[in-house]
Image (cartoon, rainbow, N blue to C red):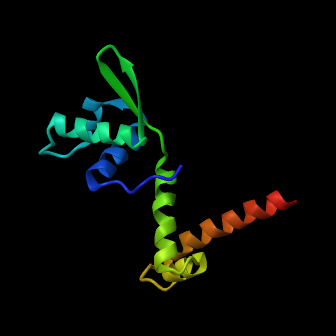
Amino acid sequence: MAHKQLTKAEEQVMQFLWKLERGFLKDILEFFPDPRPAYTTVSTVIRVLVKKEFIGFKTYGKINEYYPLISKNQYFNSRLKPIISEYFTESTSNFASYFANSKLNLSELEEIQLLVEEKIKKLKSKRK
């Protein structure tokens, strides 16, 4: 399922809902820093996210409990693929090279190296 990019307000609500895993509008509203947006503003953003099929809900009487229909990782991957395609000529190697040549410090590069090595081990163990 291909998802469109979220607006800044929509993404902010999704970030809160991903942390909550499920919650009512008042729970989501509590994540906003002061001054908080109006209840109706957040309600409108949530309705749009339901329509876009990013959020599902279960109704209890007159109130809805909301939950994400797409994981944070799924959304991130859907946003990353076009960036790799557009800026790195569809090459994940070029993308990785960008990080290797960026201003990451030694510990950040070592952390990336460990993640890559772990993934290589997992893939090799699946081949056996």
Instruction: Identify the residue at the far right of this view.
Output: 128
Within the image, what quadrant is residue 47 found in? Answer: top left
| Picture quarter with the C terminus | bottom right
Please name the residue shown 60% across and 79% down the image. 93
Residue 32 visible in image = yes
Please name the residue shown 41% across and 55% down the image. 4
Instruction: Identify the residue at the far left of this view.
Output: 35
Task: Report the front residue among 29 and 88.
Answer: 88
- Percent x, y for residue 60? 36, 16
- Percent x, y for residue 37? 15, 42
* 25 versus 41 height, above or below: above
Left or right side of 88 for 64: left
Please name the residue shown 60% across and 66% down the image. 115
- Percent x, y for residue 46? 30, 38
Task: Report the front residue among 44 and 20.
Answer: 44
Left or right side of 38 for 25: right
